[in-house]
Amino acid sequence: MDPRCRLAGLFVLIFAYSFVSDFRLLGAILAFTLMLFFMSGLPIRFILQKLKLPSIIILVLVLILPFVSGQNILLDLGFISLKQEGLHAAGLIAARFLCIIITVMIVLHTAPLLTHVKAMRAMGLPWIMADMALLTGRYLEVLGSDLKRMQIAMRLRGLNASRPGLYMLRTRAWLCGSLLVRGLERADWVYRAMRLRGYGQSMAAPCEYRVTALDMAVLAASVLTAGTFTGLEIWFGL
Amino acid sequence: MSVKSSSVLKAENVSFSYPGNGGTLHDINLGITRGEKVGIIGPNGAGKTTFFLLACGILRPVSGVIRLFEKPVTGSKFNPQAALVFQKPDDQLFCPTVREDVAFGPQNMGLDAQEVDRRAWEALYKVDAASLAERPVHHLSEGEKRMVSIATALAMHPGLIIYDEPSAYLDIRTRRRLITLMPGSAETIIVASHDLELVLEVCTRVILMDQGRIITQGDPAGIMGDETLMQAHGQEKPPSLVPHYYRHQH
Amino acid sequence: MSVKSSSVLKAENVSFSYPGNGGTLHDINLGITRGEKVGIIGPNGAGKTTFFLLACGILRPVSGVIRLFEKPVTGSKFNPQAALVFQKPDDQLFCPTVREDVAFGPQNMGLDAQEVDRRAWEALYKVDAASLAERPVHHLSEGEKRMVSIATALAMHPGLIIYDEPSAYLDIRTRRRLITLMPGSAETIIVASHDLELVLEVCTRVILMDQGRIITQGDPAGIMGDETLMQAHGQEKPPSLVPHYYRHQH
Amino acid sequence: MHIPDGILPVPVTLGGYAVCAAAVFFCLHRINKRPDPAADIPKAALLTAAFFVASLIHIPIPPASVHLVLSGLLGVLLGFFAIPAILIGLFFQAAMFGHGGLTTLGINWVIIGFPAMAAHYIFRFGLRGRQGPKQTATFAFLAGSLAIMLSVLFFSLLLVTAVPADLGAAVEKTAMLVLIVAHVPLALIEGVITAMTATFLLRVSPRVLHGV
Ligand SMILES: Nc1ncnc2c1ncn2[C@@H]1O[C@H](COP(=O)(O)OP(=O)(O)OP(=O)(O)O)[C@@H](O)[C@H]1O
Ligand SMILES: Nc1ncnc2c1ncn2[C@@H]1O[C@H](COP(=O)(O)OP(=O)(O)OP(=O)(O)O)[C@@H](O)[C@H]1O
Ligand SMILES: [Mg+2]
Ligand SMILES: [Mg+2]
């Protein structure tokens, strides 16, 4: 599928999700997301794994808001009370967050990340941004394994990783500095390699993508869905 | 591609020094003609890589002129006639996948998409790496990376390929494949290597460099077999030139 | 340093696979005793580096046990008795100057400042890198980096040093220095290398690995001289074992 | 310190995108005016990757451990390139780890990007060509820790005011105070790490410190 259409559809959808605040519509977007999820055939474990890291702020908000926000008390526990507006806000945040992140995972993980960067370039992302992003993405894993090997080397020479104080900070700073120096040195060679094969010859990268009828249909469907949610939200808000 | 000219690389009184460093190359004079396979040997820091960077126009000589295919090398112009295979393949492959990397050069030569594709596949088949085409570059083994980086050079159909220490980290099987591939990879090749056996098998002329100067040049077996000359410049006679080399140990 | 024990490394039925990869090492059984100089040869991806990481406790075997100096290797404990010299010296050096880098290990062993200093200089003199002591690590040549990374291992006075492809990118002079240095660098050494001549000169026993298995082990000249065995596993008979190897070319 | 998807109202997230786009276009314009803009791209890209990787280094502060942000150091080293670099870093973080979010990309850029540029100016103008390790360390410390504190300020302001719930002035104030105070140790650690890394670079490769 044409990644450009997929990206455009994704952005339209997630902004529509984050516009929704009516409870009936929250139910609808949740249902829609679940439908997408089952259509994608991704395992549930995959989503759960991805949800672990980012949800701390969401978790904190969802746990605190019902007790600190609003006037209508639903349940009085004496020193603390559960309030309706807060509960509403918590539900809103949780539902939108889940919908957006699940949709993003589904769409982005069906193709390598750099494909999406290339799609953005084809959609008019300035070349400096696009080239930087492609190179950054290309070398993330390389520098990541450099870091891993340096950490192993440190451990083999007796680094006490949990020793507190300046010693610990200094070894971290050295690690970080070594990564930067190695990165910059590598950049010199990468630039040479690129120049030797004609980089900067103001050759526009050829467009690798072709839009098919299916792509247009999917894009139209996502725009339509997003439009419906947005329209209904405005309608209900009136 | 001037068919008549037979000089491929000509350096005249080339000197170079890195800023803040002493002289790195001193008064290099060198001519390489079409069809030659030239090996450059010499200790670490002799200036081999630096000379290659000058020849490709990445660095500019402090004095002297370098001509590639009879035209003076200027830094700004992209010359697909000369390709350089770097010492570290990791730095040479910068695209996300192998196929894209091999296609990068031909694309910048302004060829059409079909021709680009044809050349990329042809080069990949030559180095026997067609099965890797869609793999991300950073997941390849060191040997595979080396072969792919050679393919990126081959895809540009250069008249001259310069190899900078091509056999480091290769296992013996891959090194052997490299040795059989190199002579046919381009009309003219230049190899810098510490792997004297490789130079011996591939090259028709050898140049000995030390401390930024060309010490001597000539027939590979002749130069590398000259024990006193080799030892004076930190080299050793390669074992295959020493009959019954193996001394019994322990 | 239990003086009585003579087993340095013992692997019993060790198997390992990287997550998401097939088996990488299969049922490795291996015993290395005090004073041995063992060479491990085999093609890229045979599992040499993986085995070393297991031996140092960085990876844990899926099944089987590895003992270092008769104690089972546990991941969490740092054992200054065994040192590993990495395939790429860049990965091993992370301090601002050479001297600090060499002193890093002894410092972590809890020695006093004077002893740390003494050991650092001693190691630097051994690899002939004392003149580099105050240089920043990241701007040394590849050969210098290699020698310094060996010094970082020497400074810990280990009973066992494991070298992972120590001769790549070295010039011939430095490689020769390495070959003379290695046998005395620790009581027991293990070397993985594609440089068969080096293995031949340094080792008293050679182990041939392929596809995660030990194929055979024994006398270096015996194994490496066995042409059919070597070729079956992507190796070649090293030139110094082939009398009058040099075939006249061109 | 990244705001995830789903919290902020659409006008705020779109506003973030607008500010971010304006800043990026301004920077790209400046970069394009350089004699050879293509020459700096690999440097900026690899430093971005290095920063991204370095931010995965754990710093144990018992009982927990924190990740570095390193936005101050990034600003110091990358100068104008920090602006596209941070946007790219945030995109990869959101897409690979779900850290931050895609709708909040612009607003997260505002939170990290402006303080990083502030760090750049603190360091450059503070140092004004002087090269001593003491000055370098001092200004790097200031740049590193102030960048974090500024980011925390933006972050908590946005979070507290734009959350879709009415909190009341008193609660808002305490929440902000709590957030800011809770990040002080992180800011100190960032400052120290930035200072130590800067002196490391000064000793090892001053070229890196001159920036892209
Ligand atoms: N970027 C640089 N800045 C300053 N000096 C440099 C730089 N690159 C190389 N040098 C120095 O220039 C000299 C020649 O280096 P060069 O890399 O050309 O040697 P070489 O013959 O390729 O060595 P090797 O066999 O190790 O590849 C060395 O003394 C080296 O330290
Ligand atoms: N981190 C990793 N994750 C997954 N697979 C890996 C990893 N590291 C190595 N491998 C795989 O494990 C196998 C053994 O690798 P190893 O690095 O041990 O080989 P080696 O014998 O050291 O090869 P070389 O001669 O190239 O150094 C290879 O097939 C390799 O692709
Ligand atoms: Mg070189
Ligand atoms: Mg290995």
Image: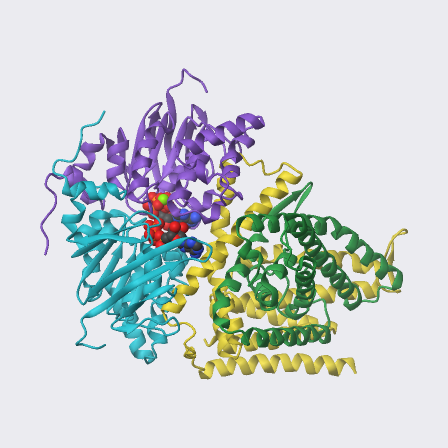
Chain colours: A yellow, B cyan, C purple, D green
Image spot of residue D2 (x, y percent): 67, 61
Quarter holding residue A96: bottom right
Image point 61% across, 79% down: which residue? A225
**Percent position of residue B226, x then y:** 16, 44
Decide which of B93, A110 is in the foreground and name it.
Answer: B93
Query: Left or right: where does residue C156 sit relative to residue D2?
Result: left
**Number of numbered tags placed on the structure image:** 0
Left or right relative to C161: residue D61: right
D132 in relation to A94, above or below = above
Q: Would residue B180 be found to the left or right of residue D130 on screen?
A: left
Res C191 visible: yes
Residue at x 45%, y 60% (from the top left corner) = A188
Q: Which residue sits at x=89%, y=60%?
A: D170
What is the quadrant of the C terminus of chain C in the image?
A: bottom left
Viewer can see residue A110? no
Q: Of all residues shown, which one is farthest toward the top?
A: C4
Name the quadrant containing residue D112: bottom right
Task: State whether residue C102 is above or below residue A140.
Answer: above
Image location (x, y in percent) of residue D159 = 76, 64
